[in-house]
Image (cartoon, rainbow, N blue to C red):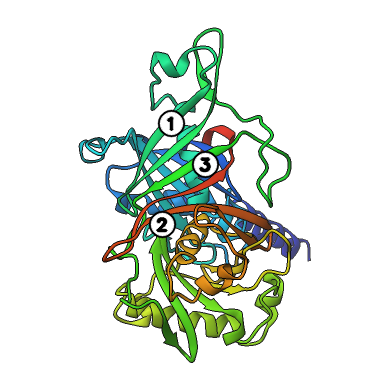
Amino acid sequence: MEHGSKQSQCLVKSRLFSTSAALHRQNRIPASYYRGGTSRGLIFQKKDLPASQDDWKPILLGTMGSPDPHGRQLDGLGGGLSSLSKVCIISPASDLSRAQGAQVDFTFAQVGIKSTDIDYSGNCGNLSSAVGPFAIDAGLVKLGEDELRAGKGTATVRIFNTNTQKIIDSTFPICVSPDGSVEAEASGDFTVDGVAGSASRIQLDFINPAGAKTGTLLPTGNLVDTFDGVRATCIDVGNPMIFVPASDLPVDGKISPNQISSTPGLLERLEKIRSQAAIKMGMATTVDEVPASIPKINIISTPGEEGVDITVRTISVGQPHKALPITAGLSLAVATKLEGSIVRPFVAKTNKAAGDPVVIGHPGGTLAVGAEIKDGDSKVVERATVYRSARRLMDGLVYWK
């Protein structure tokens, strides 16, 4: 009996302290962690990553804690939601983007939670708000004397987004220390619905944002299409989007994210519509080729609140979004200006003046978005503007196995 007990003890020890695999130190890489709008993500400098983008995958997955079959990303810095499983890669502007006045290049990666997918097909508007402040905080952009002059207090960083090949101007307050060091100002009285407290305001101007992925404002060539018996406007501003009326599904437009998830068959039907639309938008030839993150599908409805022009519920990477992706807001604001779109009648009811921003209601509150359109033989979107806040949460090393 004693001999058997010793054998059991040895077996337990061998399981706890297996020598079948060599012990090794964890991998590590310099990183920053930022909140941008209603998203959070890791920021890497491109110089710290392998030269080939193909070799980034294990780093991005490992640092975010993916894949996680439980969907929580507890072994990394992800948060189990699409809005918290994001990575930005930033570098000084290339010769190509510098010719457009850019100061930094920015690549966005949407990291799968349960899967090993890394999606570079679109941009994240929320995390775009963190790029300018990071560029200043990390010393990637040197400011001129006029920007550093006492009383000036603001900087504009011109960003080239490699995912969409588009320019974003980010304007925000800066803090200049007596020793001349500069960082983005975090404190202020600007609030973002869905984010506790207040912060300094960041203005994001998306320059010529139409056709960011598909090359055209209306990728299907139509203002209205029908998929699975549901009317839709497909538009590409910042990212490709699909807008469908709640009444066509039919569901209550004020439906909560949890109710969307729990309504039998609703997410499956929305994914079916999204896949059909993506193919007609030229983004895929088969359902299996449709990117996970774009196009995003959005349910729109008449608002019930005073001061809100339109209500939206967005599905992002298969999950109901808790707030509103910025690029969904940009596309929606432009769609309200297109006569004949599914979206236009909703805002027409509120008697919105031509130059006023569109106030969009979402599960986390509201978002005001402005858009400048030039009428002609085709619609030309000159810029779309939104206001966010961002804050540096951490600088240091992030580890993965």
Image location (x, y in percent) of residue 54: 30, 54
Which residue position holds label 2? 238
Q: Amino acid at mark 2?
A: Gly
| Amino acid type for the residue under numbered disc 3 | Tyr
Q: Is residue 169 above or below residue 254?
A: above
Query: Mark 2 or 1 closer to N-term?
Result: 1
Q: CA distance from mark 1 to mark 3?
A: 33 Å
* Residue found 58% across the figure and 59% down from its top: 324
Q: In the rendered structure, which amino acid carries the disc numbered 1?
A: Thr
Q: Secondary structure at mark 3?
A: strand
User: Is residue 138 among the parts visible in the rendering?
Assistant: yes
- Residue at which label 3 appears: 399
- On residue 134, the disc is none
Where residue 380 sits, quadrant-wise, is bottom left
Based on the displayed image, in which of its 4 quarters is residue 392 positioned? top right
Residue at left 46%, top 54%?
Answer: 371
Q: Is 160 left, or right, of 368 in this rendering?
A: left
In this rendering, which labeled residue sits more in front, label 1 or label 3?
A: 1
CB-based contact (under 8 Å), mark 3 and mark 2: no
Front one among 158 and 127: 158
Instruction: Identify the residue under disc 1.
Output: 156
Q: CA distance from mark 2 to mark 1?
A: 20 Å
- The x, y position of residue 212, in whole percent, is 34, 58
The vertical placement of 89 against 300, above or below, is: above
